[in-house]
Image (cartoon, rainbow, N blue to C red):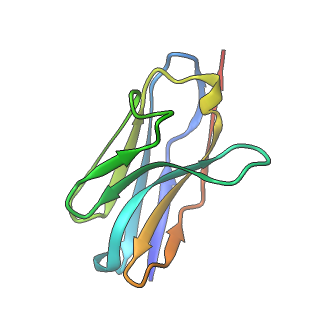
Amino acid sequence: QVQLVESGGGMAQAGDSMTLSCKASGSTNLIKKMGWYRQFPGKQRELVATIGQTGQVEFADAVKDRFTTSGDHAMKTIFLHMRTLKPDDSAIYFCYALKMGDSYIWGQGTQVTVSS
């Protein structure tokens, strides 16, 4: 089993920076990818960033110029560094892990609220 625990999030003003973290535990050797989704009210989750085992990263177009990621290569802890936050970034952010066998594990979600 893999468990994910997120931290970070909260309130920010437009233009601020914020970092989210996600720590994996359990059978982390089964993880192929980790990353982040976000969910706006009444909408489906959308991909923000994905990090492969060899460190390759892909970002959604809406954030690629403002968000970065970091983390350890053992795929145990990853970070989402968000800068120049906008009110449109207000959402619940979910960490995810894609396991061998293509099953997804989700973190509990953390609310990010950006005021103008």
Most foreground residue, 64 or 12: 64
In percent of the image, x 47 and y 20: which residue is there? 84
| Nearer to me, 97 or 63 | 63
Of the 4 image quadrants, the one containing the N terminus is bottom left
Q: Quadrant of residue 86?
A: top right
Query: Residue drawn at (51%, 33%), measured in percent from left and top?
Result: 62
Numbered disc total: 0
Q: What residue is rendered at 41% in x and 85% in y?
A: 101
Q: From the viewer's perspective, is 112 left or right of 105?
A: right
Query: Among all residues in the image, which is located at the extreme right?
Result: 42
Give coordinates of residue 40: x percent, y percent. Answer: 70, 43
- Left or right, 65 with respect to 84, comes to left
- Quadrant location of the C terminus in the rendered image: top right
Q: Residue furthest front?
A: 61
Q: Position of residue 28 (x, y in %)?
A: 33, 75
Q: Position of residue 6 (x, y in %)?
A: 49, 54
Instruction: Look at 74% across and 49% down and name the residue there.
Output: 43
| 15 to 70, vertically: above or below | above
- 21 or 82: which is nearer to us? 82
x, y percent for residue 19: 43, 37
The relative height of residue 21 versus residue 63 in the rendered view (above or below) is below
